[in-house]
Amino acid sequence: GAGVSQSPRYKVAKRGQDVALRCDPISGHVSLFWYQQALGQGPEFLTYFQNEAQLDKSGLPSDRFFAERPEGSVSTLKIQRTQQEDSAVYLCASSWGRAGLGTGELFFGEGSRLTVL
Amino acid sequence: GENVEQHPSTLSVQEGDSAVIKCTYSDSASNYFPWYKQELGKRPQLIIDIRSNVGEKKDQRIAVTLNKTAKHFSLHITETQPEDSAVYFCAAGGGSQGNLIFGKGTKLSVKP
């Protein structure tokens, strides 16, 4: 597609449920980022891939959060045993190269809004 | 790791006035500083960016300045219009970690 696509757009989960959020980056983009955006806050960095390699996962809040990008394209963010504080919009972004080294813009998806009851 | 501070958190101006938003960063290795605009319920979109080899960049009514020595950069919007109303985020990256760290945002309101 022409842009970054995320699914589902909205997800309601009961506390303790596992969820999986999908990101389809722009074709050919090397770098893929996941951010968590709470209401009224800036995007908080979660993790970053360059092709299939997860180069930085320092932002993942706990071991309940796991991300993968096995073939260097589509990525999935999985949250196990969801808790209320996980409620947020999860944004995926991609860029054609490594952030900061001539790549320019990060292109964001519309986000997946997760509500944990 | 990188830490980005952004001020003010809210800014209200009259249509036609200028608006200035300031950010500071901590990682001296950062070399890429974009600004994103996010309208309510929508995705962040890049409006302007600057690299560490220049001190200023302009694009019509918006400009960004960078002071690497002081580790701060600013967004300037002139002749503001109601459609400029949105949340603006600064970010810093390209340093040792390769990721992009965002500030907490500035909600700009332009009153007609």
Image (cartoon, coloured by chain):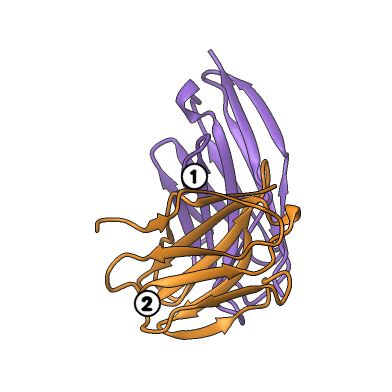
> What amino acid does circle 1 point to?
Ala
* Residue A65 located left or right of residue B81: right
For numbered disc 1, what is the local secondary structure? strand
Q: Residue furthest left?
A: A1
* Residue A48 located left or right of residue B104: left
* Percent of width and height locating residue B59: 39, 44
Would you place residue B103 above or below residue B61 in this image?
below
| Mark 1 vs 2: CB contact within 8 A | no
The tint chain A carries is orange
User: In front: B104, or A10?
Assistant: A10
* Percent of width and height locating residue B78: 51, 31
Query: Which chain comes out purple in the rendered image?
Result: B
Q: Residue at x 47, y 46 (%)?
A: B43
Residue identified by numbered label 1: B63
Residue identified by numbered label 2: A30
Q: Residue furthest bottom?
A: A53
Q: What chain does mark 2 sit on?
A: A
Q: Quadrant of residue B110?
A: top right
Q: Residue at x 38, y 38 (%)?
A: B60
